């Protein structure tokens, strides 16, 4: 897009929003301070680097598609991520899973991982000026084959996973300390039952015991933020998930840690956006894993749909941007993986920009006065306002491709880099 066209469109948009009492320049400045954490596992289909040729297996997770060019090494992964970052405006972070350490070609079991295995990532992040987040990897391992990890009745297996998560929290705290930006550590486990269980209670008591042991080690919040993530069901856990939303919500509130809201982890008719203002009454912060479920938790690339808009709107309307940690979680191997990142991240950014462009004061006054027609009318009018012109200008001012320009950049990278990987 030509600079003159972007500026002309922005000027017209600015006037339209100003008539509603919205300062678009201020919105752009707010956008610069909304960090989004990109998930590393879109680059390689959640394979990781525990051993050469590692592939995902088990744990209720499945990546579909065989588009060429997935990252085969950490060097290729960083190359891909750097390309992604070059095409996105705003503050960006990177979220790592524990299987993405630099293990030197040796198999380091998960109860033995240390910060040294991730020092390369820390150094890379410091060079790029970004923060890191971290996730324990309680799947794709022989000790997860029966479907239970932290809630396992087998004490040897349970202790193995407790030690793994303890070490992951230590690594995350070290990341935060070295980078000077708190790292979020998220716990998700696949534990559950394919068919209807008889004794859910004991399994949840075991999970609570494991979590209590894990969180008995304290770290300063300026280094580490803890979060726990629920799920409605997964492959192999269709009938019962031990770490349900009710379980983790209670645990998070009681212990004032974050709960992760992955909008693919709930019933399709549930509105995750509606949960945010309630949960924030009882915990200091929450973590989002933004994704797009198609009939189930299918982790499709994030798009600007009603669900995503409601999540962004509820956060902005509650004045809670500084209490919500925004992360992405999708993996699609059926299309260009770099493109998946850029489309998904831009969709998240546009959703938050759309929410910030709402004439909130006016809409709230309508609501208080019972002027429901006026409220509805303006909410509908906002859908046709030129928010895209504001986002394009934001990209241009950030030195990033605006409009469709990023598409050609990705096509060139596919031709020059991705298609040459065998």
Image: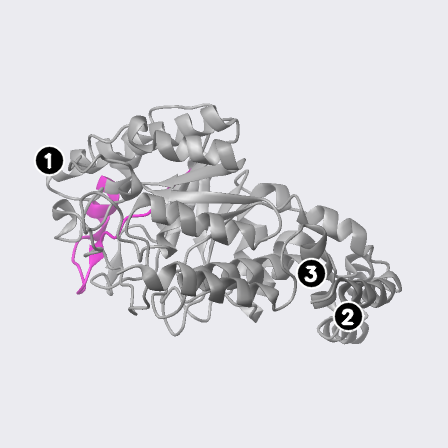
Rendered residue at 17%/33% (across/down): 159
- Tell me: residue 197, above or below residue 243: below
Q: Viewer-proximal residue, 377 or 393?
A: 393
- Image coordinates of residue 353 in percent, x first then y, are 67, 58
Question: How many numbered badges does the structure rendering display?
Answer: 3
Upstream in sequence: badge 3 or badge 2: 2
Residue contact between numbered discs 3 and 1, judged by CB atoms under 8 Å: no
Q: From the viewer's perspective, is the residue at label 3 or at label 2 nearer?
A: 3
Rendered residue at 32%/44% (across/down): 74
Q: Is residue 194 left or right of residue 281?
A: left
Q: Which residue is mark 2?
A: 375
Disc 3 crowd rating (10 Å Cα; few below 14, some 14-19, many 20+) is many
- Queried whether the magenta region covers residue 26, the answer comes back as no
Check residue 8 in the rendering and tell me which mark sits there, or answer none.
Answer: none
- Queried whether the magenta region covers residue 189, the answer comes back as yes
Q: In terms of secondary structure, where does tag 1 sit?
A: helix
Q: Which residue is mark 1?
A: 156
- Mark 1 vs mark 2, CA separation in Å: 58 Å
Q: Which residue is mark 3?
A: 391
Q: In terms of secondary structure, where does tag 2 sit?
A: helix
Q: Let me know if residue 401 appears in the view.
A: yes
Q: Viewer-proximal residue, 198 or 88?
A: 88
- Mark 3 vs mark 1, CA separation in Å: 52 Å
Q: Let me know if residue 264 appears in the view.
A: no
Disc 1 crowd rating (10 Å Cα; few below 14, some 14-19, many 20+) is few
Magenta part of the chain = 185-206
Disc 2 crowd rating (10 Å Cα; few below 14, some 14-19, many 20+) is some
Upstream in sequence: badge 3 or badge 1: 1
């Amino acid at each position: 897009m030509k600079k003159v066209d972007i500026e002309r469109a922005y000027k017209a948009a600015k006037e339209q929003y100003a008539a509603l009492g919205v300062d678009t320049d201020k919105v752009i400045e707010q956008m610069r301070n909304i960090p989004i954490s990109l998930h590393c596992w879109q680059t390689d289909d959640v394979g990781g680097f525990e051993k050469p040729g590692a592939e995902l297996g088990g744990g209720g997770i499945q990546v579909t598609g065989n588009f060429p060019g997935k990252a085969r090494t950490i060097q290729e992964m960083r190359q891909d991520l750097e390309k992604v970052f070059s095409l996105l405006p705003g503050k960006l972070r990177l979220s790592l899973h524990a299987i993405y350490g630099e293990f030197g070609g040796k198999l380091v079991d998960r109860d033995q991982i240390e910060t040294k295995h991730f020092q390369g990532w820390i150094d890379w992040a410091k060079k790029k000026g970004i923060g890191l987040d971290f996730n324990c990897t309680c799947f794709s391992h022989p000790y997860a084959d029966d479907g239970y990890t932290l809630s396992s009745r087998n004490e040897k297996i349970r202790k193995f996973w407790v030690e793994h998560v303890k070490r992951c929290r230590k690594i995350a705290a070290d990341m935060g300390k070295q980078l000077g930006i708190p790292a979020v550590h998220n716990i998700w486990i696949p534990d559950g039952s394919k068919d209807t269980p008889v004794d859910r209670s004991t399994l949840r008591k075991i999970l609570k015991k494991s979590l209590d042991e894990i969180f008995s080690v304290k770290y300063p919040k300026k280094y580490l933020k803890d979060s726990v993530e629920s799920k409605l069901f997964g492959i192999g856990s269709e009938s019962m998930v031990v770490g349900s939303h009710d379980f983790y919500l209670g645990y998070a509130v009681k212990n004032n840690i974050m709960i992760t809201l992955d909008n693919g982890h709930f019933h399709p008719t549930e509105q995750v956006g509606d949960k945010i203002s309630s949960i924030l009454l009882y915990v200091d912060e929450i973590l989002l894993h933004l994704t797009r479920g198609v009939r189930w938790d299918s982790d499709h690339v994030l798009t600007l749909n009603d669900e995503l808009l409601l999540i962004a709107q509820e956060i902005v309307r509650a004045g809670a941007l500084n209490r919500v940690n925004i992360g992405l979680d999708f993996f699609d191997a059926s299309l260009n993986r770099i493109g998946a990142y850029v489309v998904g991240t831009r969709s998240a950014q546009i959703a938050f920009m759309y929410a910030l462009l709402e004439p909130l004061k006016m809409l709230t006054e309508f609501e208080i006065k019972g002027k429901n027609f006026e409220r509805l009318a303006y909410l509908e009018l906002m859908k046709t306002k030129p928010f895209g012109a504001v986002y394009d200008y934001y990209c241009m001012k950030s030195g990033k491709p605006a409009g469709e320009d990023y598409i050609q950049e990705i096509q060139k990278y596919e031709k020059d880099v991705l298609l040459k990987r065998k």
